[in-house]
Image: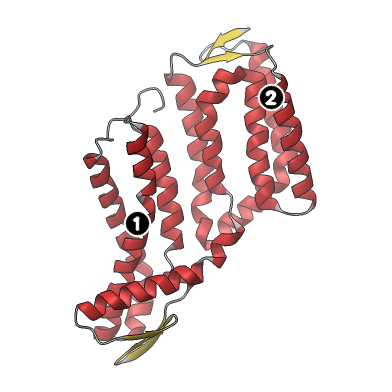
Amino acid sequence: MRYSAARLNTNTSSLIVIIGLLFMVLTWPVWRWLWQEWLGNQYYSHGLLIPVVSAFLIVQRVRNDPTFVWRNGQNNPLSLALLALSMLAFLYTLNTKAYYLSAFAMLFMLASLVWIAGGWSALRKLAFPILYLGFMAPLPFVEKSTLPLAMFTGVCSTGLVQLLGLQVHIVGNAVTLPNADLVIGAQCSGINSLIALTALTTLSAYLVQGPFWRRALLILSAIPLALLGNIMRVSSLLFVARSYGAESAFTFYHDYSGALFFVAALILLYALALLLRCTTLRVDVI
């Protein structure tokens, strides 16, 4: 059977609600873990927003896409196989407390349920909002990457300030100024900005019109923009430490400069979108 996006009958609506409730009950341990990570993991504080954004995208696609249709009664064996495999993976990883893997298995479960209840067309149109939920799940290697990123940032930043005439010496992630000794630690790695900017550029690429390669370039730009913004931030921090002392640099300036340079990266991102002519929003998704 086929239903328009705006006119689901009572039975279909009830089925969706029941499936949704069962899904939440089954996956509740993972949501509880995610909530704790969002509140306690400084690298994934943005995770709170991801489910809200995904839900908004789903509602907007259903409401605004005239070609969106909801079909049931056409169960594909592949959709049932995907549901079975994803449920097995979810239960196994949940039992072994590999919650980040459980979170990704949960996404495949959700995709298979949409496929079963709404058909392939519905799944294809809702694939991005479902997969976008992947940005809410903390990855285990993120924290391990902070030290290499911090050392990379330190080398680039000290090299830049040396070119500008500042006397500075670096060994590992320890930086020596004439008036202060500093350590470029995990908080200066820029991983927060990298993760958040990647999520933002991915969302932007989905929302705008344009050839695939241009939108892919928009997503990939998150990496150099985040790295460049962080290098500029740490470089400016070294100048502040040299001029006003390490205490001034690591109390007031360190806390507020991150937001300032993130905004600067967003401005550069918008400039790149203008250059790529990817500024017109898709009316079928927003």
Instruction: Please tell me whether mark 2 sits on a helix, a strand or a loop.
Output: helix
Residue 171 lies in what quarter of the image?
bottom left
CA distance for labels 1 and 2 = 39 Å
What residue is drawn where x is 27% and y is 85%?
242
Density class for disc 1 (Cα within 10 Å; few <14, some 14-19, many ≥20) is few
- Name which residue type carries label 1: Pro
Is label 1 in a helix, a strand or a loop? helix
Question: Which amino acid type corresponds to the residue marked 2 in the rendered image?
Answer: Ser
Furthest toward the front, the residue is 213
Image coordinates for residue 51, horizontal then vertical, percent: 54, 41
Specify whether 268 is left or right of 258: left
Residue under circle 1? 224
Residue at 58% from the left image edge and 12% from the top image edge: 8
Dot placed on the residue nearer the N-terminal end, 1 or 2: 2
Task: Report the residue at 49% width, 16% height from top.
Answer: 68
- Give 32 or 168, whichever is nearer the viewer: 168
Task: Return the x and y of residue 52 as percentages of the image width and height.
Answer: 51, 39
**Is the Cβ of the residue at disc 1 closer than 8 Å to that at disc 2?**
no
How would you rate the neighbour count of disc 2 (Cα within 10 Å): few for under 14, some for 14-19, many for 20 or more?
Answer: many
Report which residue position mark 2 lands on.
79
Confirm whether residue 165 shows in the render. yes
